[in-house]
Image (cartoon, rainbow, N blue to C red):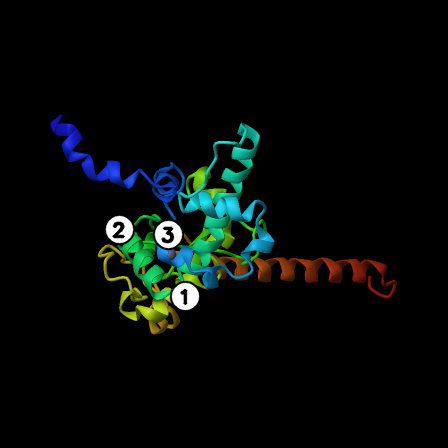
Amino acid sequence: MIDDLTTGSEDSFSNSWISWFLSTKGNEYFCEVDEEYILDRFNLTGLNNDVQNYSQALELITDSLDDEDLDDEQRDAIENSARYLYGLIHARYIITSRGLAKMLDKYRKTDFGRCPRVFCASQPLLPVGLSDVPYTKAVKLYCPRCEDLYSPKSSRHGSIDGAYFGTSFPHMLFLVYPQHLPSKTTNSLPSTSTPTTSAHAAIGVDRYLPKIFGFPVHEMAKHARWQEAQRDLQISRLEESSRDPSYV
Ligand SMILES: [Zn+2]
């Protein structure tokens, strides 16, 4: 009984469709869109053309669907439309001030994972779309430190539509909260004895320099290309001289 009391908050949380959706495994990237935002039809302008069973999907999301007369097939169809509609509303919501604040909170809790790049020192990531058009590209993760993109580790996250987050979201977040933009210098790696070139040091980005026996690989490659060029030159000279009858 004590256990029931301690999880009491979860009970009230799991009553609505949105809470159920958010607690479903794989939906961890989504934040809770305020019902107030959803109920303001102005915010949903144009979505009715994109979503099948729009009215019923919207009713399901806002827990006002009367599904007594629906068969399983209809229910499934409405359920799918509701997930899709929620994603599209989510993309609009997370670039509003309320939405940005909620996503910032998730970013600070590392809900989107950390950058796998060593020099980024476990920098938290943010979800981003490569397109604002649904069914184009799956969601990617943006690292504000190396400014590169990564695929989510889990396939559940990797199959989420990128349009549910949109192409502007992470950049909008740092525009509104510039104090959360990480510095490009990584002082948090004390063991970086690797000397960075002055050019890299100047822009303050720690970059890995591939080396073989201490020599930067691109210089080795330059040397190898020079050697090959010399050899080719030598071969063509020899061939020329063997064709030239005056050369004996
Ligand atoms: Zn990074």
The residue labelled by disc 3 is 117
* Badge 2: residue crowd in 10 Å (few <14, some 14–19, many ≥20): few
| Quadrant of the frame with the N terminus | top left
Q: Reply above or below: 87 against 17.
A: below
Q: Reply above or below: 99 against 87.
A: below
Of circles 3 and 1, the one toward us is: 1
Whole-number angstrom distance, CA of label 1 to CA of label 2: 18 Å
* Horizontal relation, residue 243 to residue 220: left or right: right
Q: Which mark is residue 109?
A: 2
| Quadrant of the frame with the C terminus | bottom right
Which amino acid type is marked by label 2?
A: Lys
The residue labelled by disc 1 is 171
* Horizontal relation, residue 117 to residue 241: left or right: left
Q: Which mark is residue 108?
A: none
| Residue at 19% from the left image edge and 36% from the top image edge | 8
Q: Residue furthest left?
A: 2
- Ligand 1 falls in quadrant: bottom left
